[in-house]
Image (cartoon, helix red, strand yellow):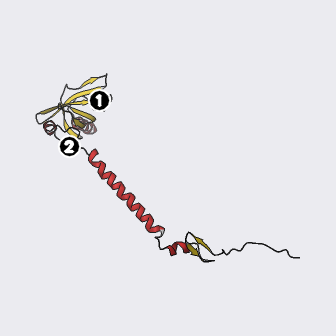
Amino acid sequence: MSAPTDTPSLEPADSSVGDLPIEAGAPAHAARESSGGLGSGPKIIAVFALLGAAMLVLAFGQASEVATYSVTVGEALAHAQGDRRIRVEGDLRHGSIQFRESPCEWRFTIERDGHEMPVQFPRCVVPDTFRDDYDIQVVVEGRVDEHGTFLADQIIPRCPSKYEEQAAQLRTAGS
C-alpha cells in the first residue's frame, strides 16, 4: 500500500518581486536583469571612484596646513611668519644653550650669514647630538612669534664636523 505524499513542488508558483512579475521557473536574476538597473560591477566602480575622489580632496585640503617651508634665518626674522609653519637651518651659537626645568624648556640661538635668531623648544628631551661641545648645524621646525623668537616643536641637530673627524680617525686607525 502506498501512502500519498504531500511533497512541495520545487517549481515556484507565479510570484512577483516588488512590482516585477516573475514567471514560474524563471531564474532568480531575471528580476534584476529586467529592471534595467546597473549590475553590481559598475556600482562598485562608482563607489570606489567617489571614495578615491573624497580622499584626494581631504589629502590636498590638509596638505597646505601641514606643509613646512624652508627659509633662511634672515628670511624668518624679516618676515615674521605668524601661524605659518616653517623650517630654518642655522649654526648653533657656542655657549647659547640654556635648560630650564620648570616649565621644561630649552633655549638657544642659531645663526647664519650674520643673522641670529633665538629659539625656544618647550620639551625636556633633546637628541643626544644636541650639544655645545662642537660645531653643529641645527634644523628647527615651528613658528616665529611676534617678538622674533622661533617657537620650535622639533629640532634636528646635524653635526658633519663630528662625523668627518670620526671617519678620519677610522681611516688612520685602519691603515
SS at circle 2: strand
* Residue that mark 2 sits on: 70
Q: Residues within 10 Å of mark 2 (few under 14, many from 20)?
A: some
Q: Residue furthest left?
A: 114
Q: Nearer the viewer, residue 133 or 94?
A: 94
Q: Nearer the viewer, residue 102 or 41?
A: 41
Q: Picture coordinates of residue 1 (x, y %)?
A: 89, 76
Q: Picture coordinates of residue 63 (x, y %)?
A: 29, 49
Residue 50 against residue 1 in the figure, above or below: above
Q: Is residue 132 visible?
A: no
Q: Amino acid at mark 2?
A: Ser
What residue is drawn where x is 25% and y is 34%? 152
Q: Nearer the viewer, residue 33 or 155?
A: 33
Q: Is residue 131 left or right of residue 46?
A: left
| Quadrant of residue 90 within the rendered picture | top left
Q: Residues within 10 Å of mark 1 (few under 14, many from 20)?
A: some
Q: Which numbered dot is residue 24?
A: none
Q: Amino acid at mark 1?
A: Pro
Q: Is residue 126 left or right of residue 148?
A: right
What residue is drawn where x is 24% and y is 44%? 68
Q: Picture coordinates of residue 105 (x, y %)?
A: 28, 26
Alpha carbon separation for disc pair 1 and 2: 21 Å
First along the sequence among labels 1 and 2: 2
Quadrant of the frame with the C terminus: top left
* Residue that mark 1 sits on: 122
Q: Is residue 51 left or right of residue 146?
A: right
